[in-house]
Structure formats: C-alpha cells, structure tokens
Amino acid sequence: MAEETNSSTQLAVNPYKGIDWSSIQQCRANFHAHTTRSDGRMDPPDVIDVYHEAGYSILAITEHDHYTDAITWPWSKWDRDPVELGMLAVQGNEIFQFNDVGSLFNGYSHSPPGLSIEEVKEGLDEITSRHGLALFYHPGRSGEKHAWYADFFSRYSTLLGLEVFNQSDRFSTDRLTWDRVLGLTMPERPVWGFSNDDSHRFEHLFGNYQFMLMEELSENALRRALQGGSFFFCREPGRSGRALAPRVEGVLVNEERCTITIEGAGWNEVEWISEKSEIVGRGDVFSYRHIQSPFVRVRLVGPFGETGSQPFGFVRSRG
Ligand SMILES: [Zn+2]
C-alpha cells in the first residue's frame, strides 16, 4: 500500500494537447476508396463528387496497385480541381494483396504481394523513401498477431496506425487487435486508429470517417494531424452522409486531479477502454490516478453511431 501512495501516474501522451477548440477546423476525411480504375464500380469523378457533396474535405482514392497503372492521381485527369472544390486530395494507393497497406502522399506502385515480413518491409521502405505515410488496412482480413504489427510500428515512423473500422465493421476483432498492439507499444509508441469506407460502390459510402483537427486545410496541417493523432474516428451505420456520429468539441485535462474530460454532443454512453479492451470507466470524466494500463481511449456511443478517440498514454513514477 505504501508503494501505491508514493507512486503517481502522469499523462505522457495526449494527442489533443495544445488544440485551440474555439478555432480548430474539423475536417471530415476518408483514407480508403476505390473506383473503376481498380475493383470499384463508380468512376473516379463520381467518387470525388459524392464525397464533395456530402461535405468531406479530405479524400484519398486508394486503388489496388496490382491492377495495371492504377494510381488515380491527380484529380485533374478527371477534370476535378480540389482547390475549387474546397478539398484536399491525397495521393494514395492500396499496396500488397495480403496485409494490405494504405500508402498516402506518394505514388509508389507495383508492390510485391506482401505475404512475407520481407515483402512488407520492402513496401514500407519504398513509401518511406518517397516521404509518404502508411497505415495497415483491415488487419482482421489477414489475421496477423498483435506482436507482428507492434514490431512494424517499432521499426517505421512512417506507419501511422491501423483501421479499427472498415466498410462499416467488416472485421470486428480489429479493435481487439489495436488494444493488444497498444498494450505492447504504449506509451512510447502511439498507434492511431482509423475508420474508412473502403468504398467500392454506392452502398459503402459515408459509414466510416474521421474528423481531422486542423488549423487550415493543407497537406502540412493534415500530416501534422495524422502524425500527432489529433483526430477522431467514427462509424455511422445509417450512412446518412451528414456526419451524425458523436462530435467531440473539447478534451480537457486536469493534471493535478488526474482527470480527462470529454466535451461535445451526440452521445448517451461513454466508455473508457484500456489494455485487452477492458472498460475501466464510464461517463464524460475519467480519472487516471490509479490506472494500471499504459493507455486509455474513449468510445462515445450515440443514437446514430459511435466515435472513438486516439489513445492517451501514461507513465507511472515514484513520487
Ligand atoms: Zn481497399
């Protein structure tokens, strides 16, 4: 007992630190979309237009690169100007046929199958050398173990995180995998969660998105938000296109009291989730004073969907 009273827990990772909530823009983003240029059923300009009309400001079209000449970039090829549309177009691709990886901000193509660790490394090296960023798509599809992912995150700063929701929720174990990965990597190496449509046809649109917290709509601001984890991911089963999932409008930390308070609208249930996906708190305020897990993340559940935070990380030190 004496040991416990002498130790203190400190918040070492707060992805929302320093955000000015009165002025920050919340930019809706999808980082995984296909068109008829690979195995999607909608043409590139139609995909761009539907996301634009639904109010998205960030879109990465990510064709499978094992289709010939499949990089859907730049949008001017389809007579679409992102600046005119008020959007940020992200160059991207889905590389590998196994252990699929979303490759952003670069034009790498013709990747190996991605079946072995060496092939995955080869692809990630290519993305890194092109100053790109990457995330694992739908980890549940390939079913690798959490230690497999954790090892890649320890090697590549280029890797941002993994999809924890894909095409509504095709692989429901992806959150479990994420929490196991975080159990190995936090607080030293945060791994961010994503929710993407992986849209191939109309029925896949608008169910999954993130709100990127950005001072302006620019590639640099997006890269900062992606690397710092300053975003929330959402799943909305009704796919309204109007972004009805819970919306966070503030994250307040009181370091003296060891509390994190979440502010916003659109939820009636709050879960604070830690190692092994265990629920360690409920309600808008969470006290981390006695937390044993190296991280906690918040899940907000409302009538139209759910929104998730990125992990907060903790270190325990002797007082
Ligand atoms: Zn895909």
Image (cartoon, helix red, strand yellow):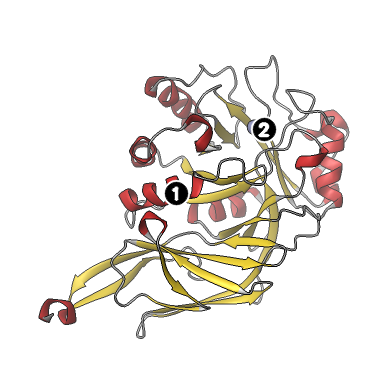
Q: Position of residue 98 (x, y in %)?
A: 52, 24
Nearest the viewer among 236 and 262 is: 236
Task: Give SS at disc 2.
Answer: loop
Name the residue: 39% across, 38% down.
149
Q: Where is residue 53 in the image (x, y as percent from the top left)?
A: 87, 51
Quadrant assignment, res 35: top right
Q: Disc 1 marks which residue? A: 176
Alpha-carbon span between mark 2 and mark 1: 25 Å
Name the residue: 51% across, 17% down.
113
Name the residue furthest left: 2
Name the residue: 75% across, 32% down.
74
- Say whether disc 2 or disc 1 marks the residue closer to the N-terminus: 2
Name the residue furthest top: 68
Mark 1 Cβ inside 8 Å of ligand 1: no
123 sits left or right of 54 in the view: left
Neighbor class of circle 1 (other Cα within 10 Å; few <14, some 14-19, many 20+) is some
Q: Where is residue 157 in the image (x, y as percent from the top left)?
A: 41, 42
In this rendering, does residue 319 appear at all?
A: no
Task: Give SS at disc 1.
Answer: helix
Neighbor class of circle 2 (other Cα within 10 Å; few <14, some 14-19, many 20+) is many
Q: Where is residue 101 in the image (x, y as percent from the top left)?
A: 54, 32
Name the front one of labels 2 and 1: 1
Dividing the image into four equal quarters, which quarter contains ligand 1? top right
In this rendering, does residue 275 appear at all?
A: yes
Q: Residue 62 carries which label?
A: 2
Residue type at numbered disc 1: Leu
